[in-house]
Amino acid sequence: MSIDVAVIPAAGRGTRMRPATRVVPKALLTVIDRPAIQYAVEEAARAGAKEAVVVVDLDAGHLVAQHFSLDGALPGLEDIQVRPVVQEEALGLGHAVSEAAHMVGDRSFFCLLSDNIVRPGHDVLASLGSGSRDGAVSVMCLRELSDEFLSRYGVVIPDSDVVDGFLDLAGAVEKPGVKAAPSRFGLVGRYVFTPEVFSILEKTSPGVGGEIQLTDAIQELGKRGRLRGYVAGESLLDVGTPEGLLIASYELGLDRYGPELFE
């Protein structure tokens, strides 16, 4: 299935990255030689997207637009249009995704969290698209989590065994913790959604943390029988913490410049 639009929520305040994010938006923090948001747009472009809707806060909108348009398109991004949309209030990830509804319309779309960068050579968006049954179901990228992460990520409810990397899902729970976790498969920031998710988000009440949670909409998709998971072979690089940013810079630097740089 061909998917030509991506939604990239990037309106987070970046509190885990203070003081760096007091002035610089989290999405524009540099990883080696480009901001985190550019990695996400490049990934979407590699998967065939022609349009990237980047959800930003009031302060970051013009900066993100300027980064992608100043002096013409960036190398490798000539065929994808970056369109910022402002989330005026920080009401949660689900709300941020819903802010892109008028730009996406009735199309299925990739969704990428800009905090997470794929490891070189391990893109997953094409696999997610291939598992969507020609746009009939939404597909979540999953990784098996250790105990410490079960209270930090959304965790899915399996409804089948894993076959060729895919499984059916009955829903998901936001940050359940070890005792309440319905599985060890966690949501890791890459999705393919059908446009049905927008009508669900319109009716979704605030959940964990008083925010409109994307995981609650995923739960509803599972109840309707239109949800699958894809188990990725590699974890993503989390650049939303100082430790994660350091690790990502090291691993991407190894790929870019070779191990001799660190000898």
Image (cartoon, helix red, strand yellow):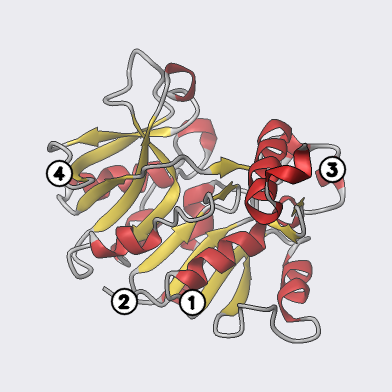
1 or 4: tag closer to the N-terminus: 1
| Measured Cα–Cα span from mark 1 to mark 4 | 35 Å
**Is residue 181 toward the left or the right of residue 46 in the image?**
left
Nearer to us of marks 3 and 1 is 3
The kind of residue tagged 1 is: Met
Residue 221 drawn above or below residue 215? below
Residue 242 drawn above or below residue 141? above
Q: Quadrant of the N terminus?
A: bottom left
**Secondary element type, mark 3:** helix
Q: Which residue is mark 4?
A: 163
Nearer to us of marks 1 and 4 is 4
CB of mark 4 within 8 Å of CB of mark 3? no
The kind of residue tagged 3 is: Ala
Q: Residue 196: horizontal and vertical position, in percent? A: 29, 63
**Secondary element type, mark 2:** loop
The kind of residue tagged 4 is: Val
**Is residue 262 toward the left or the right of residue 8 in the image?**
right
Which of the labelled discs sits on residue 103, or is there none? 1
Nearer to us of marks 2 and 3 is 2
Q: Which residue is mark 2?
A: 2
**Secondary element type, mark 4:** loop
1 or 2: tag closer to the N-terminus: 2
Residue 87 at least partly seen: no
2 or 3: tag closer to the N-terminus: 2
4 or 3: tag closer to the N-terminus: 3
Nearer to us of marks 1 and 2 is 2
| Measured Cα–Cα span from mark 4 to mark 3 | 43 Å
Q: Quadrant of the C terminus?
A: top right
Nearer to us of marks 4 and 2 is 4
Residue 34 drawn above or below residue 67? above
Q: Quadrant of residue 71?
A: bottom right
3 or 1: tag closer to the N-terminus: 3
